[in-house]
Image (cartoon, helix red, strand yellow):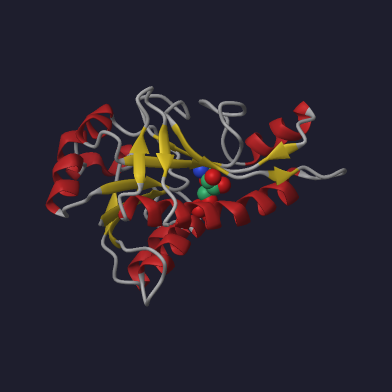
Amino acid sequence: KKLAVFVSGGGSNFKKIHEGCIGGGSVNGDVVLLVTNKKDCGGAEYARSNGIPVLVFPKPQRESSDALSPTELVDVLREYGVDFVLLAGYLKLIPVELVKAFPKRILNIHPALLPAFGGKGLYGMRVHKAVLASGARYSGPTIHFVDEEYDTGRILAQSAVRVIANDTPEELAKRVLHEEHKLYVEVVAAICEERIIWREDGVPLIQSKD
Ligand code: GRF
């Protein structure tokens, strides 16, 4: 399957997914395009040094003369033959045109257990601060399908990370990120092998390999 990954930052999830796709990794997929709103972010640099085409979307206002419209973005993804769009720390709301063009084919990873601790404005370290402030004993990544809002699409996979006494947001973030890497690679392997089944009530499930 052909994958487009969207990032705004360091891109550590993107790197793990890419590593899973190359050289006998566990993912039967190919990252064909990297989309970013920050053209010099770590994820974009990694893509360039690995021969993955980089597309800047949306472009900053001041460079908007040759900016792509949402429909043009969809066209580019189609030209690349993209099967799945993977958001991995992409901090912009993706255009509704894209959501409509790729139904059940866009995933996002969030660094806490949705439906708690999500929504507009809750990203990055703020999420981990909110988890610690709530007194929750567990956190962990959620991978969900993307709809037209922030963090509200159907949950596909989660894993639990224990919150420990005297945790700091930074330490919790680090332990959650470690789980994100494992979970995202497993989930991408599953979607590439078409191991997702949709229950009648709309809940997506991952079928195990055996
Ligand atoms: C991750 O914590 C992810 O859950 C969130 O943004 C962060 C991206 O990290 N959506 P990285 O760029 O993959 O290192």
Nearer to me, 155 or 164? 155
| Quadrant housing the C terminus | bottom left
Whole-percent x and y of residue 72? 15, 40
Could you say which quadrant of the image residue 95 lies in?
A: top left
Q: Residue at x 43, y 69 (%)?
A: 19
Does any portion of residue 117 appear in the rendered image? yes
Among all residues in the image, which is located at the extreme front? 210
Q: Is residue 93 left or right of residue 77?
A: right
Q: Is residue 135 left or right of residue 100?
A: right
Q: What is the count of numbered marks?
A: 0
Nearer to me, 98 or 20? 20
Q: Residue at x 77, y 36 (%)?
A: 137
Could you say which quadrant of the image residue 132 lies in?
A: top right
Q: Is residue 6 left or right of residue 117?
A: left
Does any portion of residue 35 appear in the rendered image? no
Nearer to me, 204 or 100? 204
Q: Residue at x 19, y 48 (%)?
A: 77
Whole-percent x and y of residue 151? 48, 30
